[in-house]
Image: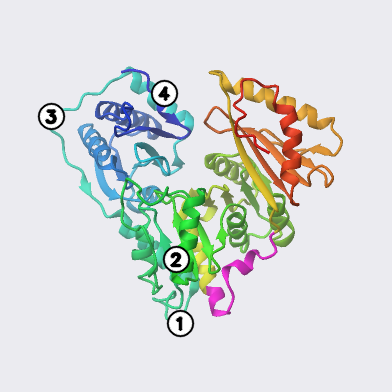
Amino acid sequence: MDNLLYLKSGTDIRGTAIEKEGKDIDLTDTRLSTITASYVNFLKCKLGKDNLKITVGYDSRVSSERISRVVTRTLADLGVKVYDCGLSSTPSMFMSIINFAVDSAVMITASHLPMEMNGLKFFTRQGGFSGNDIKEILSYAEKNEYQLKSETQKAEKLDNMKKYCKDLCDMIKEGVNAPNYDRPLENLKIVVDAGNGVGAFYAEKVLAVLGADISGSCYLEPDGRFPNHIPNPENKQTMQSICDAVKKANADLGVIFDTDCDRAACVDKNAQEINRNKLVALAAYIALKDNKGGIIVTDSVTSDGLAEFIEKDLGGVHHRFKRGYKNVIDEAMRLENEENKSAPLAIETSGHAAFKENYYLDDGAYLITKIIIEAAKLNKEGKQIEDIISSLKTPVEEKEIRFTIKLDDFREYGLSVINDFKALCEKTEGITVSPVNYEGVRVNFNEASGDGWQLLRMSVHEPLLVLNCESNKEGGVNKMLTFFKAFIEKYDKLDLSKLVL
């Protein structure tokens, strides 16, 4: 078998799965079968058992059913008891382990990536596999090609989503505790934009069942070509889509998911986004209601206003960590298990949110369910969900710029640029380096220098240097970027074409 390690994408396996513009298919049937066999071998060693039970689910991508057939056939060929869950959300596949006492779950998805891409995610009861686990699986697969037999047992069908939806419904019923217990959302109009991913279940099998008016919901039909917009809450066009839907329907709340529903965002009745820092603030409010003084672990690009909101308004502790949803989740678990500190929430500004009470699972539908419970309670008081975060201070300006590093050994070069920038800032009047930096370097500019902050960091997976900026006054970002441009122009291995003032 040829090189497979390039298919590793953080804690997932990802590659091209359908032909597009002459690009070769990475996830061929042969490779998929070999990788699946390697996963089974890894799982037997990890769990110390031979008789395995595994669930398999997939998102709405064009290639997903083909990949599912190969994976389930290979698993059955290896003597695994296989349960075919069909079209599923990623969080529901983890929950299949809890709900049906299986050993592991496989989810076929590439999240928000283009339609030609697909991939594999693996779970055990302890959570998703680590990057090192994926590396080990792919390394073993390179040396041990697997050939399918001619006849195998078939997978058994399992309606995992039915149980998952029922649990979300029960959670809302109990949380709202309305006089009409089984219809707690009958006075709310909530629109869902599923982006042609798998998120239609939330509108049809949760909200509508509980009495919500879901008219005005859009793009609920699963379609792996994603013909309307990219299913990604970080995308401007995507967020505009749900804002427009809320306006058109005159809804109380709008909800949007990524393709496989492990991320989400929402929109208030005024069609204002509750996303990124606002979403983190709302989730932190919910997490700290029963966990006073708890630690909220976030990624590194969260704003100063958010830190103030968490610590001064909510009485929690803000722990600004690294980018990467697995990084923030692992850090929250480390604080809980190794330091015996309460960390009820790990959340990225991308929309990945993992509550301790929910197995630290990044589950977009669970997050939205928690928000809707609050919305229903507030509605009875004549209040809105946005009232919760009304005191959150937001920056006047913000910007993110990504610089491609034009080298094979990109990481060493990128880190050297970051160190040089830190050294310059340490000796520049009006700029101070943040005392704690878990990745890259974050620097603060005083009012005269730009009244804000910059974070220069390496991308989690790609050959990129990323600069994030926020300012509390108009023109502040450009003032800070002028300083940065004078510094960065001498680095000829960076593509600086996106640095426009």
Q: Nearer the viewer, residue 87 or 356?
A: 87
Residue type of the residue flagged with mark 2 = Met
Q: Residue at x 58, y 24 (%)?
A: 405
Seen in the image, is 455 located left or right of residue 405?
right
Seen in the image, is 113 located left or right of residue 271?
left
Rendered view: 13 above or below 254? above
Q: Nearer the viewer, residue 182 or 409?
A: 409
Q: Residue at x 17, y 41 (%)?
A: 154
Q: Residues within 10 Å of mark 4 (few under 14, many from 20)?
A: some
Seen in the image, is 467 located left or right of residue 245?
right
Q: Which mark is residue 5?
A: 4
**Magenta-colored span:** 377-392
Residue that label 1 marks: 179
Q: Residues within 10 Å of mark 3 (few under 14, many from 20)?
A: few
CA gap between label 4 and label 1 equals: 56 Å
Q: Earlier in the sequence, mark 4 or mark 2?
A: 4
Q: Seen from this angle, which residue lies furthest right?
A: 429
